[in-house]
Amino acid sequence: MAIIGQSGAGKSTLLSLLAGLDEPTSGTVKLMETDLNQLSDAARSTWRSTNLSFIFQAFHLLPELTALENVQLPLDIRGDKQASQQAARLLGKVGLSDRQDHYPAQLSGGEQQRVAIARAFVTAPSILFADEPTGNLDAQTGENIITQLFDINEQQATTLILITHDAALASRCNRQFRLEQGMLIEGLSEARAEGLSEARAEGPNDTINKGSNVEAVKD
Amino acid sequence: MITKLALRQLKAQWRRPDGRALLLSVFLMTSLITLLSLTGDRLEKSLTTRSAEILGADMVMSSHRQLPPGWNSQTVPFGLSTTKVTQFISMVEAQDSMLRSSIRAVDAPYPLRGKVITDPPHLTSAPKSGTVWVEDSVLSRLNINIGDSLNIGYSSFIVDRTLISSPDRGSGFRSFNPHIIMSSDDLAATKVLAPGSRAHYRRLFAGTPEQIQKAEQFFRANLNEEQRLYTAQGNQPVRGNTANNASQYLKLSALFALLLGSFSIYLCLRRFSADQRSRTALLMSLGLSRTQLFQLFSIQLLCGWLLAAIPGALLGFGLHNVVLWKLASLLPQPLPPLSILSLISSPLLAGAILIVAGLATLLPLGKTSVLSLIRQGNDRPSTHKLLYLLTPIALFSIIALFVESALFALLLTTGLLLAGLISGWCVQFLIHTLNQRLKNSIRLFPLLTLRIKQQRHWHRLQGGVLTLLLTLMTVLLFARQDMLSEWQGQLPADTPNQFVIDIQPWEKESVTQWLSDQKIPSTLYPIIRGRIESLNGQEIAQAFTAEQRQHNTLNRELNLTWGNKIPAHNTLNQGQWSSADNAISIEQSMADELSLVLGDEIGFRVGSDLFSGTVTSIRGVEWASFRPNFYVIFSPGVIDQLPATYITSFKTDASQKDATTQLLKAFPTLTLIDIEQLLLQAQDLINKLSDSASLILLLTLLSGLILVITTLQQDLVQRRFEVALLRTLGASANQARQLDMLEYLLIGLSCGLLTCIMSESLLYLIYTNLLQLAPQLHPFLWLALPVLATILFALTGLLTRKTLSLPSSYQLLKSGE
């Protein structure tokens, strides 16, 4: 599913509430049958690390670790014995097998984000939050990244929650929500839908159709 | 995994200037503290040992009268070992030659601390009855050998051994005479000492420091006026409080280094913690728990400590040996062993400071939210006010614990902070003033003004620290040999360099004749020792205040003289020189401090005789003139008949070097004091001490520079941002560099100027108050210091500065990091 909204609409706040990073001033957040508000700070961290993953706009790789080490880091933190093999497998999936010993500084922006994607999926999360994952990339690279993201997402049967302001990108997801004046409304707005139909007329069709591959939100 | 990550991060940190600054601060601090504590510890121990060896005991009771027999039994409860010594001056005679000698009659064992060294080595702890140990000069002047006999009073002794060195030589001129040691069993038979004879009676004590302390308290409470008590630990008659002064200096340096070091470490860690925020958020989003996070940082701190503190301690140990090698001739050998505690205390101290500063800066990281990765810049962890308050207190407590005195640490810290604060403000004022001068001459003026305004807090800190350190360096450098040689240079050319004392009345004519034959101008003055007993008929206890009674002229015997005209090197300040009966002339400072005026009648006691004199004139006396000087001079006819010895001083030049040897050959009982030799020794001592002090200060200066680097790092981000902005707005890389250089130039010049002002003022005070010399300016300083300070700032600035290309400037601004 995609959540779309203009700058300042509250997309990031919604994300932080959903991921249990922030506490709501009123009401409760229930995710996968778990009331996040009922958990202690530590329990929430543990729950988060087993069930959630993040992909950020600014990649956030550790510069002193190689691509492989960056990907295996979350498994290392859990003490997973198969960390290295798992990480190598995921890097293979994003097409970076030959670059696994490179450091982030030796990788291009797109490659860095692919490492970040591999890292996000390596723990086989139930839900993956992606916050403007292509915001720092040029159009072509962004496109490739999204394709890979959606592909792996499908293979791993993960719920992807994509935060974006890009209507075209949002329309490739199974469900779209827009955030307007504090309300979450299903569907793209008319103006955006029109813009989108123009884009559809101009652009290649297959990019939009691939959006249907995204699995429905589990809950 | 955590360890691996920690090590990787540490490696990455090392590539960053602030990471290096942190390791360097710890390294330098540890080496300095190791050097200071090792040196301090051994100096204190060896000087106490040395004092004990000079005294020949841990504690000495000394009196002009025999100690009452009860003394012995009183010492029993304290468990001290004890022995007694009687020292007196007497003529000894052998083969018709006479020699004035300082004779010690001792009980076995002797001494209690230190060693009497003889040739051949002695087997008994004191000379056997009927034998004496004599110094080489006794043998040569009496023209006798080992195995010959000499006479003391009515007894004859066999010279058993040559005395090479011995502790407990006594103080004052008594110790200048050739020494002889005999057994006290033989003393009575010599009949040299009759009631009223001048002799020194000493009882030596030795024991554990606790025993000595208890006994000292008891004895001090029971001392009479005649008796003096000296301990090796405390108020030694010989070396003052040298050990104390030295260790205070070392402690002061240590405190300075610790303050600088902890501050650098704190700032580095603060910067480190700020950099770690987004990384921490990321690691937490990947599932790192708080405990793991704590481990991650602890491992890094531990490794950093190992990397910096261990080599630091080793360097400190090496430097300590350099200092010891420098001071080798001043310290008793062999030196007391190193204490393990002082060797490991410094790395541990550095560790404690790292922990405190680390906790203060890294604990808030645990509160970092993953949110900061999503909403950039919005999420700053709240600062802990309590933590900010507790950190300086905890750091201060560690430091106070180390220097072993909270009050000392508090006073000095406050003093240093105040001095630093004031200098900091002055530097800032100077920067501002200098900047205003540039107003119309440079294009970058508005930017420079902005920069100076932004950086003023750091400028104050940098300026304060560097100015203090440079001032100390400068004063130390100038207050050494240049001063002593300048002082010597300012003395008149005819200033005497030889003193001769103990000229007997029957030798007066021939010594005068001999000197004039050698064309050495001199005047002989008689010396009669006497005490002031009364003022205008009142006893001194009533006539003077307690404070006045401490004056040199009242608390001991005075050297009195007489003459029919005022000495050529004195000035007549008040009244008239009078040759009238019972007229006396007194010295100005004595008149001032004892509130004496013309017409006062002063009573004196010489031996059993009483005299009085009326003050008819007050003289100005130059005490540092190296001529015989007197507080009181009688008119002729009052004390002329009393037995006197004579004193004179004269100048010998290079061609007359032999004259002094010949004089001693011609008159073997004279005592000659070579002032030039004494000054050379003093010069040597001062050089060695100030070399060591300079080494310590140099290291402290390095710590100060590290602090400057650290502070330059603190707002590096802001600086880079500013440069990036300038670059994208059209400034060339050159202009950006110029702006930095102008800033360093301003702060360097300001620090240099302030250092000049402070050093010159301090030197002025030292010249006028301590050395009593005409103060002078040092033009070289006014050139060198501003240049040096500017270079220091430019160098440290360049070390931290990174040139930004235009694209990377855009990148920096875009990424918003």
Image (cartoon, rainbow, N blue to C red):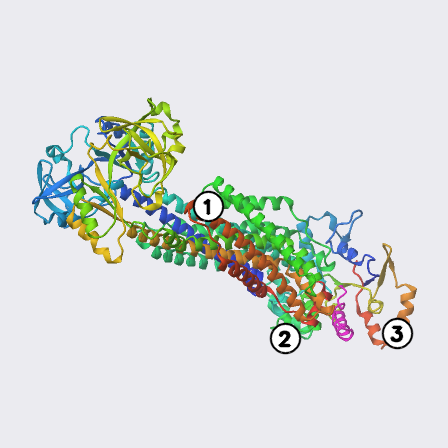
**Res. B304 in view:** no
Q: Position of residue B536 (x, y in %)?
A: 34, 23
Residue A142 located within the stretch drawn in magenta: yes
Residue A194 located within the stretch drawn in magenta: no
Residue range (magenta): A131-150
Question: As shown in the figure, which amino acid type bears the numbered disc 1?
Answer: Phe
Q: Nearer the viewer, residue A95 or B750?
A: B750
Question: As shown in the figure, which amino acid type bears the numbered disc 3?
Answer: Arg
Determine whether the residue tagged by mark 3 lies in a helix, strand or loop.
helix
Q: Nearer the viewer, mark 2 or mark 1?
A: 1
Crowd around label 1: few <14 · some 14–19 · many ≥20 (10 Å): many
**Which disc, if any, is residue B402?**
1
Query: Is there CB contact under 8 Å for labels 3 and 1?
Result: no
- What residue is shown with label 3? A200
Vertical placement of residue B216 versus B765, above or below:
above
Question: As shown in the figure, which amino acid type bears the numbered disc 2?
Answer: Arg
- Magenta part, dominant SS: helix
Count of numbered marks: 3
**On the picture, is B186 further left or further right than B496?**
left
**Which disc, if any, is residue B561?**
none
Determine whether the residue tagged by mark 2 lies in a helix, strand or loop.
helix
- The residue positioned 14% from the left and 48% from the top of the image is B141
Q: Assign the N terminus of chain B to one quadrant of the image.
A: bottom right
Query: Is there CB contact under 8 Å for labels 2 and 3?
Result: no
